[in-house]
Each structure stands twice: as C-alpha cells, then as structure tokens.
Image (spheres, grey):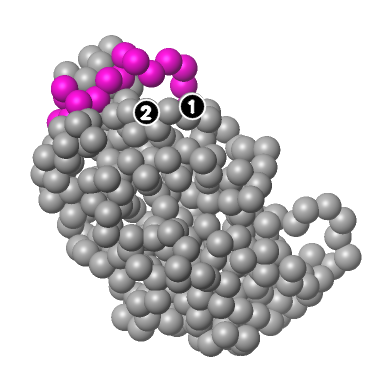
Amino acid sequence: MRAAAALAPRLEPLYVAYNRAAGARDPIELVRPYAAPEDREVAAFIASGLAFGNVRAVMQSVRTVLEAMGPSPAAFVRGFEPRRDARALETFGHRWIRGRDIAAMLWALHQMLATHGSLERCFLAGDDPEAPDVTIALESFSTRALALDYREVYGRTTGRPGVAYFFARPSTGSACKRLNLFLRWMVRRDAVDLGVWTGVAPARLVVPLDVHIVRLSRCLRLTRYSSPGWRMAAEITASLRRLDPMDPVRFDFSLCHLGMQGACGFGRRQRDRACPLRGVCHPGAVRGNISTRRPRAVR
C-alpha cells in the first residue's frame, strides 16, 4: 500500500496530460468520427482487432477496412454477405491477417448483430454482473464467436482459421489485449475513450496488455510476472485498482503512450533520467526484454 500511495500522485498528472483526443496517434481516432453508437462499436471492434504491430501500419490497415465498409460500418455488417462482399478485401494484408480473415470476422459480427441486435448485448449475454471483472464475459463472448460457422468464408478448411485471432480467451492464458482494448474504448468515458456501452462498469475492466504496459508495469513493480498473459494482466489491474477502485484502467492510455514516446528508461542508456515517473520506476531492476514476436497462441 505504501508503494501505491507513492505512485498515485505521480500518475494523476500523467493521466491529465494525456487525456486529450487531439494528436493521440491511436486507432481510436479512426472510430471517433462515427456519431452513431452502433457504428462506433463495430468500427472499434475492427480497429482494436488490428491494433498490433507498427502504429503507422495499424492506422493504414484500419483505414483500409473502414473505407471498404462505407459510411456506416454497422449497416455494412448487417447486410454482409461473404461471397459478395469479401471481394473488396481480397488484397488486404496486415501482418499475418489476410482479407478472408477480416471477412470471417465481419461474418461473425453479422451473426452477433442478427442474434442480439448489438455487440454490447451479445457481450452481456455471457456476463455475470456480480463477477469482479470481465473474465467470464470475455470467455463466453469468444467461445460463442469461435463456435460460429465460417464455411461461407473459408470453405471446408482444416486447422485453426485466422478469425480465431480476433477472439482470444482468458482460459488459454491469453492476455486478450485487443478485446480488453475494445472494452476500454466502449466502457470508459473521458476525452479519449468513447463510453458507448452502459452495461459494464469501468471497475470491472482489465488492462490491455501491450509491450509498453508490460515494460512500465514491471518497472513500476505493478506485477511480479515476467511473461505476458492473463495472469499478468489481472495482477497489473489489481495493482491499479488500489489506486482507483472504480476505474483501474484509466491510466492505461497515458502509460502506454509514455512508453511509445520513449520517455521510459527501460533498456535505454539514459535509464529513467527523462521519465516523468523517475523515482518511482526502477528500470534497472527489470532484466531481459519483452518479446514482440507473433505469439504461438492466440493473444
């Protein structure tokens, strides 16, 4: 608790400094122009699902998919027919994701909207509001998505189709980074996050675990784990919950972008001299590097 007490006053100014929509250099900026909640949740799922790799490449890939969908992503998904509409995505590629994987993901969203009316209601159908966090809901959401029939897109393929990458599950040990990012955008409301959903409390969110959050969390001693995964994400969230029980992941955006801008001293010759968290972070205590290579299991 003493560590939390020392960290809280250092994180608050950081949150204020980064809590602005302009110049975020983040895929959420491609979601914000949509006014309708149904368009925002569909666009956000696509943007978060592709949020891995080089930031510039991420932004371009998200733009490419959203432009192919026209002015209303929700309307496009509701009317999506794989054999007709997947053609617009045939040449798409983002790292190991191909156009037919995007088509399969859109086909999953189509079936969710047809059954539940919105992605929020689909998510809530597997939720336990008494659960301390969204673990159960995430597990149910992705399990139901993976059980859908994708033969309209992939044919009678064998093996694990690429669409599985968009529907990670905590039970596999995955950190579920992109799904937790999607939930942060949908549930929280401030200058950055959109607050489209009302059925999930911010207190139940889990931090989206990217390489920057892993590094900074280890430097700040928010976790004892060295390998990224669901246990690390849950432990970091528990540490942040001591700072803000009602909204533990609100520091995610500022910590992530602090790392993206290179102010963190992790693995750098200047150590933490340029870090605004100097004195409470300990980059010298963290050994080794966090791998950013493609994970073997779905993350």
Q: Is the magenta stretch mostly helix, strand or loop?
A: loop
Q: Is mark 2 on a helix, strand or loop?
A: helix
- Tell me the crowding category of disc 2: few under 14, some 14 to 19, or many 20 or more residues within 10 angstroms, Cα based: many
Could you tell me which secondary element the residue under label 1 belongs to? loop
152 versus 288 height, above or below: below
Q: Indicate whether residue 150 is drawn in magenta.
A: no
Magenta residues, start to end: 275-290
Q: Residue 218 carries which label?
A: 2
Q: Residue at x 23, y 35 (%)?
A: 1
Question: Can see residue 47?
Answer: no
- Image point (46%, 21%), residue name: 289
Residue 11 position in % (x across, y down): 18, 41
The reply to whether residue 271 is visible in this rendering is yes
CB atoms of marks 2 and 1 within 8 Å: yes
| Amino acid type, residue under disc 2 in the picture | Arg
Determine whether 165 is above or below 229 in the image: below
Q: Residues within 10 Å of mark 1 (few under 14, many from 20)?
A: some
Among the 4 quarters of the image, the one containing residue 59: bottom left
Estimate the x, y position of residue 15 in percent, counting from the top left: 18, 48
Work out whether residue 269 or residue 143 is closer to the camera in this orientation and state it: 143
- Residue marked by disc 1: 226
Q: What residue type is labelled 1?
A: Ser
